[in-house]
Amino acid sequence: MEFGSSFGTCFEAAKPHLLISTSSKNTNITLRSRTQRFSFRVSSVSYKEFAESALEETRKRIVLEPSPLQERYSSMTGLDGKTQLQMLAFKSPKIRLLRSMTIENETMQVFDFTGFMKPEYDTPIFCANFFTSANMNIVVLDLNPLHQLTDQTDYQDKYYKNIMSIYHKYDEIFPWGGKLTGESIKFFSPLVMWTRFSSSQDKHQALFSAFLEYYQAWLEMIIQVKEGMEPSQVRVIREAQHKYLTWRAQKDPGHALLRKLLGEAKAKALLREFLFNGVDELGTKTFIDYFPEYQTDGGTERYSSMTGLDSKTQLQMLAFKSPKIRLLRSMAIENETIQVFDFAGFMKPEYDIPIFCANFFTSANMNIVVLDLNPLHQLTDHTNYQDKYYKNIMSIYHKYDEIFPWGGKLTGESIKFFSPLVMWTRFSSSQEKHNALFSAFLEYYQAWLEMTIQVKEEMEPSQVRANREAQHKYLTWRAQKDPGHALLRKLLGEAKAKALLRDFVFNGVDELGTKTFIDYFPEYETEGGTVSEKRSIIGKSFATRPWDSNGQFIG
């Protein structure tokens, strides 16, 4: 889940924390002091007290009443029978929805606390999203702006200029947490606290204090804001909030967790009806209406996420394009026993650069990695292509060849689709190895990205046709013989797996050409005219690396 914002100066971190007892029928709050010593078992951190402290402060200044959502959403139990979800929902004359969700089990806690104003008021959205596991805390705390601040500096001056001191009070304690996408950053303010940290008593007390200070600042805005917007302004505010909700309902990173905990149907209902309530009521525009850059050639985001037949395995997909790149796509698969990462980049046929290919598989005992810039054209027949794209970057491979040795036999057929840059390896997990893999992935990708920047469009029609057919041949091979097929069939069933493979993972196999697998690889045809299930027909395999240190094929 994305993470939020809050404020306040009336509470010290040392103040005894508060626990809440509530139900959907009775919204009165029972408070008791929390006096036991703080420890860093996950079960010892309770975000319910954050919500209760904020609500207690709210009631001092604003009349709250239960939202109709409280009757429908008060508590849920996860599919595992252990995970508990607790929800609270309120409203006031100015607040459309003030809602809280906490998730707790033995391994994690999640806190999602948000406040949305009625469209007659342009106050920012209060947003606090906290995630705690045994080893890590992830925090987003912000007053999300209704309007993009780069376009509306007066809005920034109105709501943020005089409270930046709150952020600076905590910026050294909670440093920036890493990369945020250019798309998501538009929904944050300069007040945002986006951080990751290991648990400590000081950090959790500081977070509690920061949460209250942010929340009190937002509460003060609510009290001070006046109604009286022009109808046109109310429409603008309504659309701005709807755009925010539409983004969150589609792209919030907490979706996968909820699907894992509740299953697809319940997770979707909770997201749209409770967490991002208003996405179906405040406007009629779709995600693509607001963010047309996400539209695929098929017209919609057909593939963004899926849940396996076991209701636990989550598949997350991303897909992009550019003036030169036909498809840049990612697929991540996660469950309790495995993780899979499949990241690929395909150029438009007017450009002959290699295909970026990263396929990683992790289980409890083993990691299997293929990382390469797959050549469009077979290098033994096109030495000029090898000189053009691989000769000057072989040093990247040699930087990692001792850390990641050759992983074992590859068939003679599949080796044709790899370059001398290929990292094909197996290893047992270690922090050092995973750090090195991350570094290698980025170096390979940066090399490919530089190629996409430098490459010039091919103007010769015959060469464009050759590039198109080469990419189609590659996709046809992968769509038929890729070793990941069996896993997808097991996770999704035959029909969904086939659609995912042909429409998304190997997109282009049905569009870039008309030749069949047998047309390209006649040696695989059986007497009955079908494709042989064998991985190799020629029977040759390579147990050791078949290129020398200069990248020349030695077989």
Image: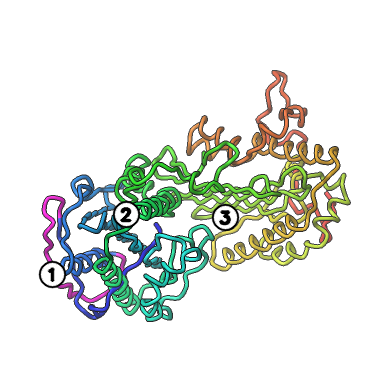
Labels 2, 1: front one: 2
The answer to whether 399 is drawn above or below residue 406 in the figure is: below
- Residue count near mark 1 (Cα–Cα under 10 Å), binned few <14, some 14–19, many ≥20: few
Of the numbered discs in the image, which one, if any, rests on residue 32?
1
Rendering coords of residue 90 (x, y %): 21, 55
Name the residue nearer the viewer: 337 or 73: 73
Which residue type carries mark 2? Pro
Residue at image x 85%, y 37%? 462
Give the quadrant of the N terminus: bottom left
Which residue type carries mark 1? Arg
Magenta span of residues: 23-42
Q: Pick whichever of labels 2 and 1 is earlier in the sequence.
A: 1
Which is the main secondary structure of the residues drawn in magenta?
loop
Q: CA distance from mark 3 to mark 2?
A: 51 Å
Q: Pick whichever of labels 3 and 1 is earlier in the sequence.
A: 1
Rendering coords of residue 495 (x, y %): 52, 30
The question of residue 74 being in magenta is answered with no
Name the residue nearer the viewer: 241 or 113: 241
Labels 3, 1: front one: 1
Residue at image x 27%, y 51%? 82
Q: What color scheme is it?
A: rainbow
Q: Quadrant of residue 437?
A: bottom right
Name the residue tied to disc 2: 119
Residue at image x 15%, y 57%? 22
- Residue count near mark 2 (Cα–Cα under 10 Å), binned few <14, some 14–19, many ≥20: many
Q: Is residue 348 visible?
A: yes
Q: CA distance from mark 2 to mark 1?
A: 36 Å
Q: Relative to 488, is 463 on the left or the right?
A: right
Name the residue tied to disc 3: 367
Q: Pick whichever of labels 3 and 2 is earlier in the sequence.
A: 2
Which residue type carries mark 3? Asn
